[in-house]
Image (cartoon, rainbow, N blue to C red):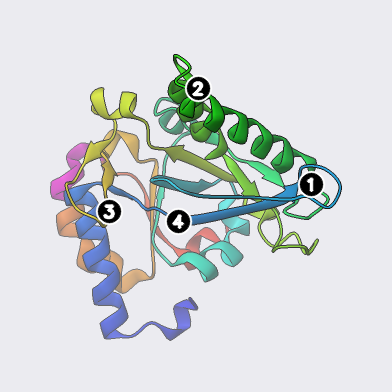
């Protein structure tokens, strides 16, 4: 999204998304992740998974233009500890190529676990779920069978849903399909807010001040962060 293309309608939509996030917390979306590799000669391996997650980037704000051009002009800056305390962390980038052995190894383990589950092996399902959670931190660095490194420079971190985090209240079930979960966000959790432009900031400021009180973080536009 190019901020020069903003109009009244787009500003209103961004403002509503900001209000919604402050009121109802961060979304956990369910992207379709796909990894490919090999598990032996002429044996392609594929892993596809759908699991609720919230994604972040560690890009410097001054270098974030390609990121917000792809994903939008609204940002919530949190600390690494915010992510780590919710069992999150940086992703591990994989090649996503038919020569990739890591995906093949995972497929072999998943296949073996499925056999143990069918055989009734105690705790096999628990092990499968643990491995599935771990797999949620694997991400393709390139488009399939290309070495274009399309996603490598995003420096992505993730919070992936776990029942444990839900029980502790760090992740909240919504009872809805979209989003199925949200992450509570308090004013002290937010180090900075990034908004599309000064018009959106001005319109949002009364509600931001009510939400944050004395803990209101800096509120900068995407143009302003380019100079940090």
**Which stretch appears magenta?**
209-215
Whether the magenta-drawn stretch holds residue 71 is answered as no
Give SS at disc 4: loop
Residue 221, image quadrant: bottom left
Whether the magenta-drawn stretch holds residue 210 is answered as yes
> Can the viewer see residue 155?
no
Q: Are marks 4 and 2 in contact (CB under 8 Å)?
A: no
3 vs 2, front mark? 2
Q: Which residue is mark 3?
A: 179
Q: Which residue is mark 1?
A: 100
Q: Looking at this view, is 70 or 96 the one in front?
A: 96
Give residue 76's position: percent from left, percent from top.
38, 50
Distance from the alpha carbon under mark 3 to that under mark 2: 27 Å
Distance from the alpha carbon under mark 1 to that under mark 3: 32 Å
Q: Is residue 164 left or right of residue 134?
A: left
Q: Is residue 69 left or right of residue 108?
A: left
Q: Earlier in the sequence, mark 1 or mark 3?
A: 1
Q: For label 1, count other residues whose C-alpha is less than 10 Å away and answer few (under 14), some (14-19) or many (20+).
A: some
Q: Earlier in the sequence, mark 2 or mark 1?
A: 1
In the image, which disc is placed on residue 127? 2
> Can the viewer see residue 81?
yes
Q: Which residue is mark 4?
A: 31
Q: Earlier in the sequence, mark 3 or mark 2?
A: 2
| In the rendered image, the vertical position of residue 88 relative to residue 6, given as above or below | above
Give SS at disc 3: loop
Q: For label 4, count other residues whose C-alpha is less than 10 Å away and answer few (under 14), some (14-19) or many (20+).
A: few
Q: Looking at this view, is 175 or 184 the one in front?
A: 175
Q: Are marks 4 and 1 in contact (CB under 8 Å)?
A: no
Give SS at disc 2: helix
Assign the magenta stretch its main secondary structure.
helix
């Amino acid at each position: 999204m190019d901020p020069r293309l903003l109009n009244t309608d787009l500003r209103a939509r961004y403002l509503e998304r900001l209000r919604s996030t402050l009121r109802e917390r961060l979304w956990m979306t369910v992207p379709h992740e796909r990894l490919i590799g090999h598990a032996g000669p002429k044996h392609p391996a594929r892993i596809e998974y759908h699991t609720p997650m919230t994604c972040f980037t560690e890009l410097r704000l001054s270098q974030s233009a390609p990121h917000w051009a792809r994903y939008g002009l609204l940002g919530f800056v949190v600390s690494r500890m915010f992510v780590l305390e919710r069992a999150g962390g940086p992703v591990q980038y994989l090649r996503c190529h038919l020569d990739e052995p890591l995906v093949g190894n995972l497929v072999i383990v998943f296949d073996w676990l499925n056999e143990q589950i069918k055989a009734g092996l105690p705790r096999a399902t628990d092990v499968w779920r643990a491995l599935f959670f771990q797999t949620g931190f694997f991400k393709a660095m390139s488009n399939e069978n290309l070495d274009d490194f399309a996603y490598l420079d995003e420096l992505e971190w993730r919070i992936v849903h776990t029942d444990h985090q839900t029980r502790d209240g760090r992740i909240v079930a919504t009872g809805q399909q979209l989003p199925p979960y949200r992450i509570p966000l308090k004013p002290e959790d937010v180090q900075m807010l990034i908004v599309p432009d000064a018009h959106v900031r001005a319109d949002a400021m009364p509600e931001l001040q009510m939400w944050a009180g004395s803990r209101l973080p800096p509120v900068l536009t995407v143009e302003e962060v380019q100079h940090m």
